Structure formats: C-alpha cells, structure tokens
Amino acid sequence: MLEIRNLHAAINGKEILKGVDLTIHAGEVHAIMGPNGAGKSTLSAVLTGHPAYEVTEGEVWFRGKNLLEMPPEQRAREGIFLSFQYPVEIPGVSMVNFMRTAVNEKRKYEGQEALSAIEFLKLMREKKKLLEIPDKLNNRSVNEGFSGGEKKKNEILQMAMLSPLLSILDETDSGLDIDALRIVSEGVNRLKTPDNAAIVITHYQRLLDYIVPDYVHVLANGRIVKTGTKELALELEEKGYAAFE
Amino acid sequence: MQHSSEIRIVAGETRKMVLLNEPSLSLTITQEEGSRLVLHIIDLGERSKVKGERRKVENDITVRQLGKDCTTELYGLAYVRGTDEVTIHTHVFHEVGRGISRQLVKYVLDDEAKGDFYGELRIAKDAQQVDAQQTNRNLLLSPKATISTRPQLEIYADDVKASHGATTGQLDEAALFYMQQRGISRDRARNMLIGAFMKDVVLTIDDEAQRNELIETIDGIVE
C-alpha cells in the first residue's frame, strides 16, 4: 500500500529525514517510536504534504501512485488521514460544515454523489455511536475550546467519517488521560479492517498496550535504525532510546 | 460626497440599524439616558469597475452618550476588493457615567484594496464607571492590499474600564493545511475561513431574516 524509499526531507534547509525506508501492506499496524527530534512528526508531515517540508531525495508510492506529486488534499482523498498531534482550532467553521465539506469532496473525487444534509447527519450519528463519542460538538466550531481529550476524540471521529486506507496517528496519546486513551484507541481498533493500515507514532509504549502493532520501528536521527515486533516496544520502554542516540 | 445625517435616540429607546453597501456617509447619533444603539455598517460591494480607478467610500460615525446607562454597539464589516478604498472612522464619546460601548470592526482586503480604520474613544472627566471596548481585526488576502488602523483613546475619568485591540494578519496556514488534510481543496478552505471571519460580525445582527440573508450573501461572495 505504501512504499517509502530512501526518503530525505528538510525544513528551513535543515535535513531531518536522512534516508527512511518503510513498506506497509494493507491490514498492518506499524508503530514508529523514537526519541524527541528523531523525525517522527516530520515523517507524518512529509507524507501528508505539509508545505513547510522539502523532500530532497527519495520516493513515496501509495497504491502505485506517486504520492509526492500530489497536493495535500489529493493525498487525503486518495485515503491518507493524519490524526494531528495538535489539532487546529478553526473559529467560525462548524464541525458539521467542515466534515460535510470534507466527506463530499472525497465522494466527488471518487465519482459518488454528495450526501444530503440528512444522510450526512445520520452517518455522523452512527460513527459517534460506534466510537462512544457524545452526540454534541456538531454546531461548535472545529476544535475551538475543546479539551485535549475532546480534540483527540474528534480526530478519530473525522477518521471514521472519512474511512481512510492509511491512518497516521501522530502522538495521539499525548495529553490524554486513561479514559480518553481507551476511547481513542478502541475507536482506532474498531475502524481497523483487512483493507486499511495504520502508522502509530508514539514516544511511549503505553499506547501500544491498546493498539497492538504488527511491527515496531525505531526512528533515530532521521533513519529507521531497528525494526521488530511488539516486544521491541517493551524493550525500549525498559532501556530507553539511549542506545540509538 | 458624504451623505450626512443626525439621529437622536430618546431615553429608554433601543435603536437597531443595519447599513448595507451605503455610499459615503457621515452620521451623528446622540443617545439619551438608558438608550441602546446597535449599529451595523456592512460594505460588501465592489465598486471599481475600470482597472486603475479608485473608488472610495468613507464612513464617519459619531456617537455621543449624553445620558447615563446608555449602551452603544458598533459593528463594522468591509470586504474590499479591486482598487476600492473603504474608511470607517468612529468617534464614541462617553460624556456621562455608567455607559457601555462595544465596537467590533473587521476588514477583509484583497487585490490592491485599501482600508482605513480610525477609532476615537473618549471618556469625559466626570464619566465614571464607563465600560468601553474597541476591537479591530483585519485580514489581508493579497500582498498589495493595505490597512491603516489607528485607535485613539482619550480617557479623562479614573474609574473606568477601557480596552482596545487591533490585529492584522493573513489566513491561518495551519488551519488551511488541516482542512486540506481532510480533503478540502485549498481554495475551498480559504473561502470557508474568509466566510467565517466575516460572518462573525453578521451573527451579531438580531433580526433573523436580515442575518440569514447576509450570511447567504457572504457565502455567495466567497464561493
């Protein structure tokens, strides 16, 4: 599904990713762990097309298409979803308006008809129920005044609404209490199918108790320096990242 | 030419006015004890039809609170495009005590448009316990658009609350990227953010029909 080859990327002329190689197949969950500043968030920014980052070398293929040639919105419509570490507040744009626009732009891209207001609200209610997210927030501005936990739940709700093929969860556990962590990770687990995949970026092993990865990669100094199974995460928890820094 | 008029709001009266796409005007409003004024000045028109032509609209609003316990709410919204220029000058005079004033003026400036906000707020020596706020927010959509903003506070009383704030900026890049990451095109995302910035003013209009009509107008403009 996703193939990253020798990916180098820089921000403000400073190279952060220094040759990342990673292959992800449908149905897999990959955890990316590593010390602060290793390039974890840069990887998610580059995959989603953040304009501040420049790819200086390498290739990224998503379902046979050259991802790096696409603007961010096209990558999203192709099925890449990023759960932001810091979800952005958008004053004056209601959740319903925002999500309905997003869902319908994706449907249009796929050649499907737009959802009516009623169909859309029904879908939103279903997804909220599935994720155990209270049925409010609809008329509030996107993320505005949301608590840390509400913002992360809202990211997962958006993920459910858009049914992405590849979800990237960037430090989704940061700032979550244990209940919010459970709701968020159970949500992610419920959305998992044999056809989709996830990249879980985290500094801590804790999240991986809930979202069990098939593979664990250690990203350090802009490269994947070690790959293992979920036991590697436990080892990292015990020994820290010192060996890789 | 500025159209000039005077309005008197008698004691206890509430007066609501929405001025939409008016030509230049000069308005002086006096408020008597316990009266309330809610005034919206909204300019969404594009006037310069010929390239290089500069059409200028000047709004000059003076409000005098002559009696105690008056409330003044002034809202301004200008979406200025092409080579148009829109000025909004406000003069709010608290002549006596216990008055409240709220001002919110927003500009969206595109192309080579010009904006000019001047906000004079004066609290007279004996006008104690006045609560006055003035806010000016400007959104620049083009590098050639300009705004001049000049708050002018003159406070002669000592037991008052008075605040003002002015910000000028561009569209929030973080918000644009967030929206694009959800599959919304950059143009559409821009339009949604511009619309939200403008509707903030329109949403303060009490009359539902008028409010909805303006929201539709804004949707039409930004899409």
Image: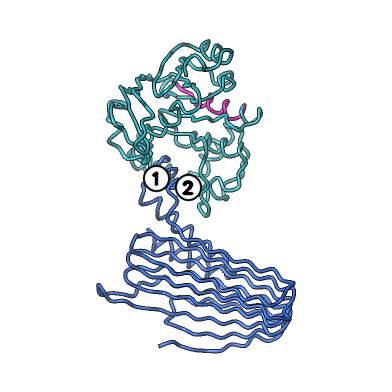
Residue range highlighted in magenta: A182-193
Q: Which residue is found at the position 34% from the left and 20% from the top? A: A21
Instruction: Using residue A196 as the reference point, say whether residue A237 is left or right of it.
Output: right
Q: Quadrant of residue A134?
A: top right
Residue A59 position within the rendered picture, expressed as x and y whole percent measured from the top left: 28, 26
Q: Quadrant of residue A172?
A: top right
Residue at the left extreme?
B51
Chain of residue at mark 2: A
Residue B159 position within the rendered picture, expressed as x and y whole percent measured from the top left: 74, 72
Query: Is the C terminus of chain B in the top left, top right, bottom left or bottom right quadrant?
Result: bottom left
Q: How many marks?
A: 2
Instruction: Say which amino acid is labelled 1.
Output: Ile
Does the magenta run of residues contain B86?
no
Instruction: Kindly indicate which chain is depicted in blue in the rendered structure.
Output: B
- Look at mark 1 in the image and give the residue it sits on: B184
Q: Quadrant of residue B70?
A: bottom right
- How crowded pointer 2 is (Cα within 10 Å; few <14, some 14-19, many 20+) is rated as many
Does the magenta run of residues contain A188?
yes
Residue B152 position within the rendered picture, expressed as x and y whole percent measured from the top left: 56, 74
Instruction: Say which amino acid is labelled 2.
Output: Phe
Of the numbered discs in the image, which one, if any, rests on residue A98? 2
Task: Label 2: state its secondary structure.
Answer: helix
Instruction: Kindly indicate which chain is depicted in cyan in the rendered structure.
Output: A
Query: Is the N terminus of chain B in the top left, top right, bottom left or bottom right quadrant?
Result: bottom left
- How crowded pointer 1 is (Cα within 10 Å; few <14, some 14-19, many 20+) is rated as many
Instruction: Using residue A236 as the reference point, say whether residue A224 is left or right of it.
Output: left
